[in-house]
Amino acid sequence: MDNVIQLQKKLVDYKTSLFNEGILDDQFTQLQQLQDESNPDFVVEVVSLFFKDSERLFDELAKTLDQQNVDFNRLDAHVHQLKGSSSSIGAQRVQKVCILFRNYCEVRNIEECLKCLQQLKREYYFVKNKLETLFKLEKQIMEAGGTIPVQ
Amino acid sequence: MATATATAAEVYGTPSDEELHVLAVDDSYVDRKVIERLLKVSACKVTAVESGIRALQYLGLDGGKSSVDFDALKVNLIMTDYSMPGMTGYELLKKIKESSAFREIPVVIMSSENILTRIDRCLEEGAEDYIVKPVKLSDVRRLKEFIIKGELEENSKTRHQKRKQRDEDQPSSSSSSSSSSSSSSPTTSLSFLQLPAGDDASSSDPPSSPSSPLSQPELLLGSPSKRSKLLDRD
């Protein structure tokens, strides 16, 4: 049982740090509140959709930026989508980069847009890594017979 | 709106066990999944579609099918994203308000963008509310209360009218005809659009401080500007 308690503390501390560092925001908590016994994998499912969607969008963004004549409207539309989905799962830092990115789309600055895409990917893989660690911790707790501490 | 073969649910306005049926329209997979869960947790039936076209098809408004689709449960609320490829939420709103069969269905716009002119335009076109994304549980709860209240008032109005009609058709039954004019239902004087005061404090969720980067002054059903717009429209 000690193990479960230790793991639970680890999870709470880890989650708290993610919120404190602005990596996740309140929307993530909202999602967790929507999870229950009837839908025990809701958060993982939504986040997985986000991962899939984001990686698809990165490909689109790269392709669009690679064109001779960059279609900034198309670029903006893709970033808008990413902004929406990151906001919906509470990936705050990804969302912030999207906002910056859209500003550069508006002024049609290719260099800055390319930089934003790189920054976006960095933030994305960063939060992906954090979330996967979080989910692993939760799984460990469940497997040890414990329950996930409610925020 | 009720035809000869209409079900009781269609005549009386709400699905049998008071469960609202919401049609959610959003092109984002993530958002569709979230709104679906938000609504299910709030005990609503949900039909989630990915575009305005699909929404119109579901309602039977796309011109390709008969105008009333008996397979589709009566829809009590439509929640649509604003920015969608093809048909925007605004365009969908217009189409619904132009339709005699569906214009009474409340339509709510969801958008990540907090643009005043956009909000105004949507409200002017007949949207009940404009919710800045991400949509929260408290938003859905508030909406649900508002819709149910409206449905109850509609139902009591309808029942009152039916009773009146029946009484007028049968002048010989003396007891009912004299009482029909003295409105026994206290709610008939309230319009569907009457808004509860101070609704923004009604959420039972602990207030969560908005930590998203955008400042999101959410448009609340109880807000003065919204109320005056609706009253003008009426």
Image: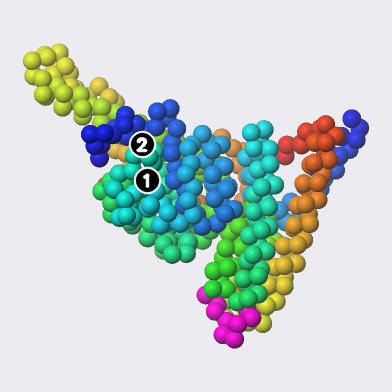
> Between A125 and A25, which is closer to the camera in this rendering?
A125
Q: Chain of mark 1?
A: B
Q: Quadrant of residue B148?
A: top left
Q: Which residues are magenta?
A: A65-73
Which residue sits at x=64%, y=33%? A38
Where B12 sits versus A74, above or below?
Answer: above
Q: Is residue A70 magenta?
A: yes
Q: Quadrant of residue A80?
A: bottom right
Q: Give the total number of marks visible in the rendering.
A: 2
Q: Is residue B9 left or right of residue A120?
A: left
Query: If the image is split into quadrants, where does the C terminus of chain A sit?
Result: top right
Q: Secondary structure at mark 2?
A: helix
Q: Is residue B206 magenta?
A: no
Where A117 sits versus B222, above or below?
Answer: below
Which residue sits at x=11%, y=24%? B168
Which is nearer the N-term, disc 2 or disc 1? 1
Q: Amino acid at mark 2?
A: Gly
Q: Pointer 2: residues within 10 angstroms few (<14), some, or many (20+)?
A: some
Residue A61 visible at all: yes
Where B44 sits versus A122, above or below?
Answer: above
Which circle marks residue B106 in the picture?
Answer: 1
Residue found at the far right of this picture: A2
Q: Is residue B160 left or right of residue A136?
A: left
Q: Amino acid at mark 1?
A: Pro
Give the overall secondary structure of the magenta segment.
loop
Give residue A107's position: percent from left, percent from top: 56, 80
